[in-house]
Image (cartoon, rainbow, N blue to C red):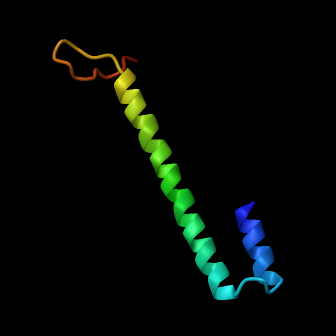
Amino acid sequence: MLKAALLRAGAEGRLPIEAMEAWLRASSELRRSLQQLVKAAVVLQRAADAPTGDDGRAQAAAG
């Protein structure tokens, strides 16, 4: 949605091409960062949910 709006604004001359490109790069970097944040949250949640042994360390899943 944002990408389409930026491309449209650039194509229609409402946004200079250099600015459009900068905004597209920034939004792409933000999207990738958010994806990595979600991946990290999933890993942390799985680690928190993992059964632990007597020493408090996570045990490997059997099977």
Image quarter for residue 7?
Answer: bottom right
**Residue placed furthest toward the front:** 14
Image point (36%, 17%), residue name: 62
- In the figure, is residue 26 to the left or right of 5? left
- In the figure, is residue 44 to the left or right of 12? left
How many badges with numbers are in the image? 0
**Residue placed furthest toward the left:** 55
Q: Is residue 45 above or below residue 15?
A: above
Image quarter for residue 16?
Answer: bottom right
**Residue placed furthest toward the top:** 54
Image point (80%, 75%), residue name: 8
Image point (77%, 67%), residue name: 4
- In the figure, is residue 3 to the left or right of 38? right
Percent across and percent down for residue 49 are 39, 21
Q: Is residue 4 above or below residue 57?
A: below
Q: Is residue 61 above or below residue 10?
A: above
Percent across and percent down for residue 40 are 42, 43
- In the figure, is residue 36 to the left or right of 62? right
Location of the N terminus (image quadrant): bottom right
Image point (53%, 61%), residue name: 30
Percent across and percent down for residue 59 are 28, 20
Location of the C terminus (image quadrant): top left
Percent across and percent down for residue 45 are 41, 30
Q: Is residue 50 above or below residue 40?
A: above
